[in-house]
Structure formats: structure tokens, C-alpha cells
Amino acid sequence: MAIVGILLWWYTDGWKQTLRSSGARLRSLLDYFSIDILLRTLFSPFRQIAASGVDGPIGLKLRAFGDRLVSRLVGAVVRTIVMLVGITTILLMFVWSVISAVLWGILPLLPIIGLILMLIGWIPWKIL
């Protein structure tokens, strides 16, 4: 009776909890990397102290334009790298979530498979 209760929990509530925790981890990673915000602000200045207009001679204005341009390029490079790392991490977590869900379903069957293999005389180190 206890084995039936354990298996009943394993394949109902246990599986739901596993899927919920995997979903929570994925949502957490999506929030942590915020790919949508990084895309919206891809060419925004990166940590620029003064991004306002500059009054003065043309040389000073060109220098301010160059500073803003470099700041935007640095921001684009940094945000692109963070997006690539984030997408890779999210994809790896998704793959791990699928693998763990499949393993969750197979794990209770492993003792039965082991018993069957033992009864037929299979030895892992003697493949042939």
C-alpha cells in the first residue's frame, strides 16, 4: 500500500512540483537577463555621465558627439554579449528541465529494470 501511495504521489503531485520548479527557474532566468529590455535599449548610451547637448564651438560639439557615439557602441557590444550569454543560459536550463522531467518519470522504473537485467544474467562489463 505504501508503494502505491509513493508511486501515486511520484506521478501526480511530485511531477507537478518538478515542472513548477523548472518553470520558476526559467522565469527567474528570463527576469534576470531581461532580454526584452536589452533589445529595447541596445543602442542606448552605456553609463554615460553627461548625455545632454553641448553648447560651444564646433570642435566641442564634435567631441561630445564622438563621446556619445563611442558610449552607444560600447553599450551595444556589452548588451549583445549579455544577451548571448542569457539566451545560451536559458536554452541550457530549458534542456535541463526537459531532461529532468523525463528522468523523473523513468527513475521509479530503474529498480524494476535492474531486477529484470539481473534475472536474465546481463553483466554491464561483459557486453559481448
Image (cartoon, helix red, strand yellow):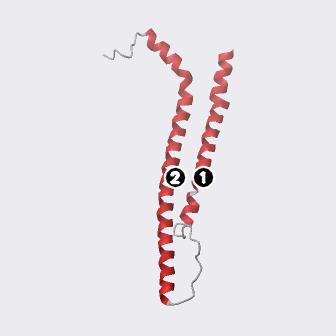
Precedes in sequence: disc 1 or disc 2: 1
Q: How many marks?
A: 2
- The image shows residue 47, relative to residue 91, as above or below, that is below
Task: Estimate the x, y position of residue 44 in percent, counting from the top left.
Answer: 55, 70
**Residues packed near mark 2 inside 10 Å, few (<14), some (14 to 19) or many (20 plus):** some
Q: Which residue is mark 1?
A: 32
What secondary structure is marked by label 1? helix
In the rendered structure, the answer to whether residue 13 lies left or right of residue 48 reads right
Q: Which residue occupies 45% across, 11% down?
A: 118
Nearer-the-camera pick, 19 or 59:
59
Q: Which residue occupies 48% across, 60% down?
A: 80
Nearer-the-camera pick, 124 or 66:
66
**Residues packed near mark 1 inside 10 Å, few (<14), some (14 to 19) or many (20 plus):** few
Q: Quadrant of the N terminus?
A: top right
Q: Which mark is residue 75?
A: none
Q: Residue furthest bottom?
A: 57
Task: Estimate the x, y position of residue 100 in percent, counting from the top left.
Answer: 54, 34
The amino acid type of the residue labelled 1 equals: Tyr
Q: Which residue is mark 2?
A: 86
Task: Estimate the x, y position of residue 120 in percent, counting from the top left.
Answer: 42, 10
Quarter of the image for residue 48 reads bottom right
Q: Quadrant of the C terminus?
A: top left
Q: Which residue occupies 68% across, 20% down?
A: 5
Task: Estimate the x, y position of residue 24 in percent, counting from the top left.
Answer: 63, 44
The amino acid type of the residue labelled 2 equals: Gly
What secondary structure is marked by label 2? helix
Q: Residue furthest left?
A: 128
Quarter of the image for residue 46 reads bottom right
